[in-house]
Amino acid sequence: MSLPSAARGVTNVVIRCEAAKETGFLDLSDCQIMYIADAIYMIIRDSPVTKVSLMCNQMQKFPKKMVTKLPGIRWVNFNQNKISELPEEAGGWSLKGINASANQFTAMPEVVFSWSELNVLDFADNQIKELDVERLFESLPNLKGLNLANNPLTSEVKERLEKLKPEQLIMQL
């Protein structure tokens, strides 16, 4: 990346952070970021951010600091990254929706089971084979949308999902 291109990228991120102060939506999608710099948290501090998009970046780790710096997050989208785990600290969020599709998860993160208010759970296009279906549905009573498409789920897991699926749930396998 050339210096002028890098400068444009930084400027773009700053503009998006400033917009988040007004909208409550921090959109850092497609910014080629590998991590969230502390400067981003400084720009948006004391802002009522409730939605974050980190989609289409090059992140390998979910930003643990985001949990403490942005405690009001309700919707998070980080699809199309290289993330394989979520920090347990994220259990403090009262998430309504998460899109973690097209990452590198091999199991459903433990923290997911703590988000009892969750309506939408999208972990499509990962490498998840096994899933505690009973626990999933018991822990997430408000779930309305579940997307696990293009995961190598075992036939037993798929059967349990179909059998135990709540009536109101829209599910993609």
Image (spheres, grey):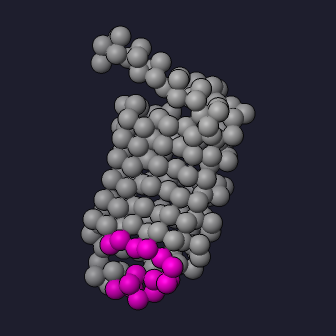
Horizontal relation, residue 17 to residue 46: left or right: left
Q: Which residue is drawn at 40% across and 31% down?
A: 31
- Is residue 86 depicted above or below 158 in this figure? above
Instruction: Answer whether residue 156 is magenta in the image.
Output: no
Horizontal relation, residue 76 to residue 24: left or right: left
Residue 120 visible in image: yes
Horizontal relation, residue 60 to residue 115: left or right: left
On-image quarter of the C terminus: bottom left
- The x, y position of residue 104, in whole percent, is 34, 54
Q: Which residue lies furthest to the right in this view?
A: 46
Number of numbered callouts drawn = 0
On-image quarter of the N terminus: top left
Q: Residue at x 27, y 69 (%)?
A: 152
Q: Residue at x 34, y 86 (%)?
A: 159
Write down the region rendered in magenta.
159-173
Residue 41 visible in image: no
- The x, y position of residue 68, in whole percent, is 66, 43
Q: Residue at x 65, y 33 (%)?
A: 22
Which of these two is toward me, 83 or 98? 98
Q: State which quadrant residue 117 falls in.
A: bottom right
- The x, y position of residue 169, in whole percent, is 48, 76
- The x, y position of residue 67, in whole percent, is 61, 46
Q: Which residue lies furthest to the bottom in this view?
A: 163
Q: Residue furthest top?
A: 4
